[in-house]
Amino acid sequence: MLHGLDRLLATIEGGTLDEAALYRQERLYRGPARRAGAPGVLECPICGQRAARFLRFGLAGRRNAQCPGCGSVERHRMLWLYLGQHTDLLRARHRVLHTAPESCFEARLRARPNLRYRSVDRYNPAADVQADLIDLPFADGDFDVLLTSHVLEHIRDDRAAMAELARVVQPGGWAVVMVPYDPRRPRTEEGADIDDPAERMARFGHPFHFRIYGADLSARLAEVGFDATVIDSRRLFSPHRRRRFRINRNYLLRCRRVG
């Protein structure tokens, strides 16, 4: 996840800053400087920061979205709570592959003695491995856990990326997949043939996205060997917890790698 993308949007849409050049800027991966502000009723479950309000974030400037401590946004907080309360990731021994690692997670996961943790990213020089998700340099079944959040929508041939991710997860292993997802759409809205960042921004809400996934996402994942279950934040957490941790209506897919 990049920070400060909104300030570069005009340059991107004007065609003078391409995706590779943007995502290689290491400074954009750093979250906000930790702010001590007055404690309040909001709390980040990742870093423990309490605040009266969170920071704006995103191209539309969502209010109360970003933790002023670790830089997490709503989907990160949902994922962290899910991993801690509904999986054994933080307790059992696992070989983990983390794509496009978020700064609010990476150091915390890497430091856990129960995990053999590897990160991969196409552009981020701080990742353990720089590689395209359609051609990963790992053996079949090298990992038993995969974490991938808001990456597949950036890839033109997402089915090839899904197949490659499934290949490196051992049968019986599991994955958590998060993407821009709207279950009210019966089919994914595609734009893999669109080269203009301004048009992608208008269609998908981001200059480097190629789609918004619909209810057919589970079927796409099944094609490559992932049995997926959709988890809705509104069913996972009470209204009180969603307000406390600032978690919006969001979804993740818990996937089991079938043989």
Image: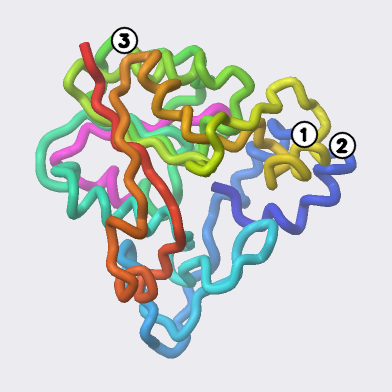
Marked residue nearer the N-terminal end (2 or 3): 2
User: Residue 171: where, in percent of width, then height?
Assistant: 20, 16
Between 214 and 93, which is closer to the camera in this rendering?
214
**Residue at position x 70%, y 27% from top?**
191
Q: Mark 3, residues whose alpha carbon is within 10 Å: few (<14), some, or many (≥20)?
A: few
Q: Secondary structure at mark 3?
A: loop
Q: Please say if 190 is above or below 141.
A: below
Q: Which residue is mark 2?
A: 15
Q: Residue at x 60, y 37 (%)?
A: 212
Q: Residue 56: x and y, percent? A: 60, 70
Q: Which residues are magenta?
A: 107-123
Crowding around mark 1 (Cα neighbors within 10 Å: few <14, some 14 to 19, many 20+) is some
Residue under label 3, please give it: 139
Q: Residue at 35%, 75% (x, y): give it.
A: 244
Query: Secondary structure beneath disc 1?
Result: loop
Give the residue number, with chain letter if any, for mark 1: 18
Q: Count of labels shown?
A: 3
**Horizontal arrangement in the rendering, residue 175 relative to residue 24 (left or right):** left
Q: What residue lies at 64% left-to-right and 38% top-to-bottom?
A: 23
Instruction: Give the CA distance from mark 3 to mark 1.
Output: 31 Å
Residue 250 versus residue 195 in the image, above or below: below
User: In the image, is residue 71 part of the stretch drawn in magenta?
Assistant: no
Query: CA–CA distance between discs 2 and 3?
Result: 38 Å
Q: Is residue 184 above or below residue 82?
A: above
Q: Amino acid at mark 3?
A: Ala
Instruction: Give yes or no for contact between labels 3 and 1 (Cβ–Cβ under 8 Å).
Output: no
Mark before the other along the chain sequence, 3 or 1? 1
Q: Amino acid at mark 2?
A: Gly
Residue 101 image position (x, y, % from top left): 43, 41
Marks 1 and 2 in Cβ contact (< 8 Å): yes
